[in-house]
Amino acid sequence: MLRRPALSTQQLWILRTGMLVCSGVLCAFSLYLFGQHMWHGAITGDWPWIWRTGQWITHHGLPSTDLYSWTFPGRNWVLYQWLFEVAMAALYSIAGPDGSVMALCVFAVVIYVLIPTAIHARRGVPVALSLTLGSLVLLPVSINLGLRPMLASCLALLLQFVLVHRLRRGTLSLKPACAAIAAVYLVWANMHLGVAMGLVSLSLFATGDTLDRWRDQEFVADWRSYAWLTGAALAGSLVNPYGWHIYSYIAELSLESAMNAHIHELMPPDASNRYVATGIALLALALVQSWRRPGRLAAGDGLHVLLFAIATAHSVRFVVWVGLFYALVIPGLWANDRPDHEPTPAARAASVRILALYSVLALAMIGALLPWRLGAVRMANCAPLAGGIRYLDQHYRPDTHWFSSEIVGSCTRLYAPQRRVFIDTRFDMYPENFVLRWYHAYQHRDDWQRLFDHWRIRLVLLANGAPLLPLLEHNARFRQVWHDRHTHLFELRLKVDSNAPGSENNASLLIRDPEALH
């Protein structure tokens, strides 16, 4: 069998330099695309009420009923993410929108790129490879990443991953591991319902270690350790204002399948999206390398990537977590063949230099290039709606019943914070049947006139492209009282010419008590 001739020192230097240059170009390009996406989409439609709620809690304490909707003002409000809202309100008051998005970008680079790279460098994985894979992971992750409570779950899952790995390798004993897990879950349960994913993650580690024990793998923990970790996690998670109710609340939301079917982030990802395609390509690369080097990964690690990839195929919301586990697990497929490999001092120094260079590149991209190239951060596409919201707020009484999309409802928190709305983006805070009836009315389906009659709607504020807009423009019972290039405000007529086009189908919109409008 012919053997390849050994490369000379000069050839090796040229090859490594070329690989580093290619890696640097890919990292820079990925960072720029990621930052650009965050600049335009990190502040989502949820942000206005997250910010305002955080402000309210800071000054008044935890509310028990809805602060913002006139439809269900007395409905119990389960603010399971109250601590995240308080933290984000503080960040926003200090850094403003641009600084908040910069902080999010730095956070993402740290947990998706720098920390995984530092972990893998100890196992002999080339730093340039880990940095490149982590940077590319940021692209599919950006599809659903934003200034939202999911960030708490990203950080908590990362911390749990590190703690479990240290426990399995014997560098952390069980008691401090349980104490650390309890502390993580205590904070986590007050920031995001993703705390349930943490328990799923622990079960995946336990299942994987059981499989690895049968394969005589070296680094595993026994079922008793996982039982203690799970108990500590549950105990920590119960230190929240709602106790066990957060878990029953998760179950209730999961069963509301009819409502969930209309929530964008709970739908499957669009395979034609270039960032989704990047994620699929990264998974394909992982499959090929797994086939080339079988048994390289711990079973529990592989189960995390597999299960969260399947979850992402059904719901794009999970892309942020499959990306995290990909960055934490998959570079290990390129680890040194010797499990006890320790990089030499020279290799460690080179790794530190490359990490420092990458960090400088990321900070320069986020802190200088993006603001210079893209200007101010986009505020959840709320700016085009500002004129209509302000006109309504200035010309109609606070108790006027009005109808809008959920995005208009949420953006109202920015421009008319005292104005209560019909609905906003917090679908889980409303009864499922109400959300479905609103959705069908907004899509001008299922007798939208009856919904308007039931809630005594006087005003309708719609943005360009709203499905209901063409109907109201030609409806005899509504007149357009204001519009600009982006929004249209309609008012209910109390008297209608019976001969006017469309009037024969609108008898249900007659108001029985006109005084209720004023």
Image (spheres, grey):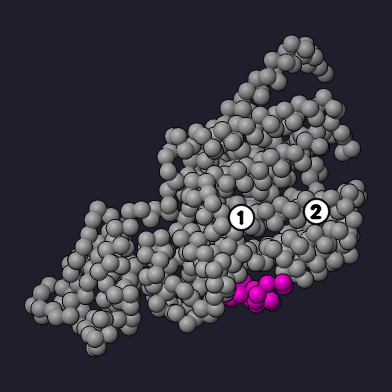
Question: Which x, y percent locates residue 263?
Answer: 48, 63
Residue on which the image places disc 2 = 163
Question: Which x, y percent locates residue 183?
Answer: 76, 62
Spatial separation of the CA atoms under disc 1 and disc 2: 19 Å
- The region drawn magenta spans 238-258
Q: Residue drawn at (80%, 67%), measured in percent from left and top?
A: 232
Q: Is residue 500 magenta?
A: no
Mark 2 element type: helix
Q: Nearer the viewer, residue 11 or 396?
A: 396
Q: Nearer the viewer, residue 493 or 286?
A: 493
Numbered circle sitting on residue 151: 1
Residue 480 appears left or right of 118: left
- Looking at marks 1 and 2 on the same chain, the residue that comes earlier in the sequence is marked by 1
Kind of residue at badge 2? Leu
Kind of residue at badge 1? Leu
Numbered circle sitting on residue 10: none
Q: Sort mark 1 into few (<14), some (14-19) or many (20+) by Cα contacts within 10 Å.
A: many
Mark 1 element type: helix
Q: Look at the magenta stretch and give its main secondary structure.
A: helix
